[in-house]
Amino acid sequence: MPRRIGYIVGLCCMLLLGVAAYVCPLQWDLTEDKRYSLGEATKTLLRGLDEPVEVELLLEGDLNSGFRRLRRATEELVDEMSRYGKVRMTDVQDGSTEGLQPTVIHEREQNGKTVQTTVFPYARVRYRGRQTVVTLLKNNRALTGEQNLNKSIENLEYVFAEAIHSISRDTIARIAFLEGHGEFDEADVYDVSRQLSRYFDVDRGALTDDVQALSPYKVVIVAAPQEPLSEKDKYILDQYVMHGGRVLWALDGVRLSEDMLSESGMTPVIPLELNLTDMLFRYGVRVNPVLVQDLQCMTIPVDVSGEAGQAQYQPMPWTYAPLLLTAIGSPVTKDVMQVSSVFASTIDTVGGSAEIQKEVLLATSTASRQTHAPAEIDLNRIQVDPQMFGSAYLPVAVRLEGEFPSVFAHRMIPEGLTDNVRLDKSVRTRQLVVASGSVLQNHWQQGQPLPVGYDRYTGIQFGNRDFVVNAVLDLADDNGLIALREKTIALRLLNDSRAHQSRAVIQVISVATPLLLIGLLAMSVWIIRRKRYILL
C-alpha cells in the first residue's frame, strides 16, 4: 500500500510539473553564441507593444536544407518574441508576394542534374494597419551560399526589431542634408535619400540666423561642401552638437577638376579649405589635404589601341578609386562589403581626451599611398609601381562618441546671432567623419539614378548604401537596436565529400546505435529485476 501511494504521489508531481511548464514555460539558452536569446533592446521594444504584431512568412515551398534552416530560425525567433510581446505568425495570404523580387536557386544534385527553385525570402510585418517587408536573405557576392545564409540568420533579430520599431512608433524622426556651401545636390544623393526615407523624414536646406534651426533634426548630413563655412554656420552646427545633435561629415580634403582630367588628362590638386579644421580638431579628428592611391581599387575602361577610329578598351586599375576595407567589430560595418570611393583623403585622430571614443570604420588596404597637396594628376605619367604603395590601413572614416568641447568656448558669439542657451561642452552624443564625399554620391545613366556604390563598368554593387544607412541609423539610435547587428553565430559545416564517402557507415551507426542502447537498457532492467525477485 505505501508503495502504491508513492507511485500516485510521483505521478501527481509529474502532472503538476507538466502543467506548470505549459503555463509558465522556462528556457535556458546554453549555446555559446546565445543564438536563442533576445537582446535587451528587443525585449524592451516588444514589452511596449499594445497591439498584436502579425508576421507573415513568405519563405515556403520546396526549400533546400539551407533555406529550411533560415525558415526554421525565423519561426524560432518569432516564437521567442511572442514570450515578450504580442507577436504571432499568420498564414500566407493570396497576392502577398506581388511586387517582391524572387530569388532563383540553382542546385546540382548527385546525379549531375541541375534543379532550379524560386523562393521569396521575405516576411511581411503588420501592426495597427501599417506594414513593412523584411528581407531575410543577405546576398554578399564575396561569400559562399552557406556563409550568406548564416549571416542572414545572424541578422534576423535586428531586421525584425527594426521593422517593428519603424511601424510601431508614433512619430517619425527627421534628418536633414545641409545646403548653401556647394554640397551635393538632391540628384547626387538621390539613392541615399530614398533609402533613408524608409526610416526618417528627409529634408534639405541652408542655415539662417536662427541658432535653433537644426534642433528638430535627429541627424544632420554635411555632404561634400566645396565652399568655406561662415563663422555663423559653424556656430550653429557647433551648438547643435553641444545640445546632443548628431552629424555625419562627408568632407573632401582636396580640390581637383574631373572635367579637366577627362579632357586634357591632367588636373592640379590643391587643399580644400572649408574653415572646419579648428572645429574638427576640437572634436578629435583632422581631415588631411592628401590624395589616396591604393592597389586595391576599382577599374576603368582605357583605350589601348593607340590608333584613331579603332578603339579597343580594356579594364585598367584606377588607383585613385580605392576600395575601402570595413571594420569587423562595429555594428555599422559588420557584414558590409568594401566601400568604393574616388579621390579620397585620410583622417588623423588628434587629442588625448578620454571623454571621446574614436573608432576607425573605413581604411585603405595594405598596399596604399598618399600624396600631399598641392600636386597634380597626370594620366600620361601614372606608373603603378607596387614598391611605392607601402602604407597600410590609412583611416578614411572615423566614428566619434563622447562629450565634445565647443570650438567657440572662450570666444564671442559671431555677429548677427543671439543665443541664450549656449553650451561650452556637449552632452554625450555621436559624430561620424568620412574623408570622401564620393562615398555618398550616386551616378545617373540614361536618366535613371544608379545605386550608390554601383560600378557601372563591372556591374558590382559595393557596400556604400549599407554603410551610409547603417551610419545614420547608428547616429540616430537611442534604443540600442543597432547593437543587435553585432550578434554572431558560429558557422559549423559538414565535410560534404567525407560525408558522401562514409554515407553507408553513418547510416548504419545512426540506425544501430539507438537500437543497441535500447537493448542494453532493457538487458540491464531484466538483470536487475531478476536479481531482485530471486532475493525475495
Image (spheres, grey):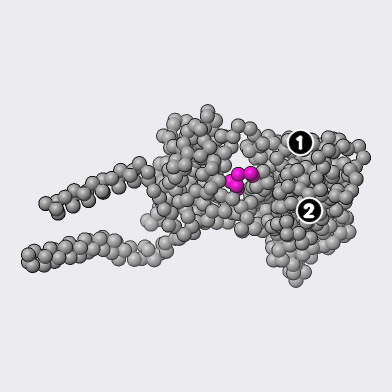
x, y percent for residue 103: 50, 44
Instruction: Compare residues 202 and 233 and report the one nearer the observer.
Output: 233
* Total tally of numbered discs in the picture: 2
Can the viewer see residue 28 in this picture? yes
Residue drawn at x 60%, y 32% is 170
**Which element type, helix, strand or loop, lies under badge 2?**
helix
Main structural element of the magenta stretch: helix, strand or loop?
Answer: loop
Image height of 135 relative to 265, above or below? above
| Mark carried by residue 149 | none
Residue drawn at x 49%, y 45% is 104
Name which of mark 1 and mark 2 comes first in the sequence.
1
Asked if residue 181 lies left or right of residue 20, the reply is right
| Residue under numbered circle 2 | 283
In the rendered structure, which segment of residues is drawn in magenta?
A: 477-482
Q: Residues within 10 Å of mark 1 (few under 14, many from 20)?
A: few
x, y percent for residue 507: 29, 61
x, y percent for residue 252: 80, 51
Determine the image quadrant of residue 503: bottom left
Image height of 506 relative to 452, above or below? below
Asked if residue 74 lies left or right of residue 335, the reply is left
Amino acid type indicated by mark 1: Arg
Q: Is residue 498 magenta?
A: no
Image height of 119 relative to 95, above or below? below
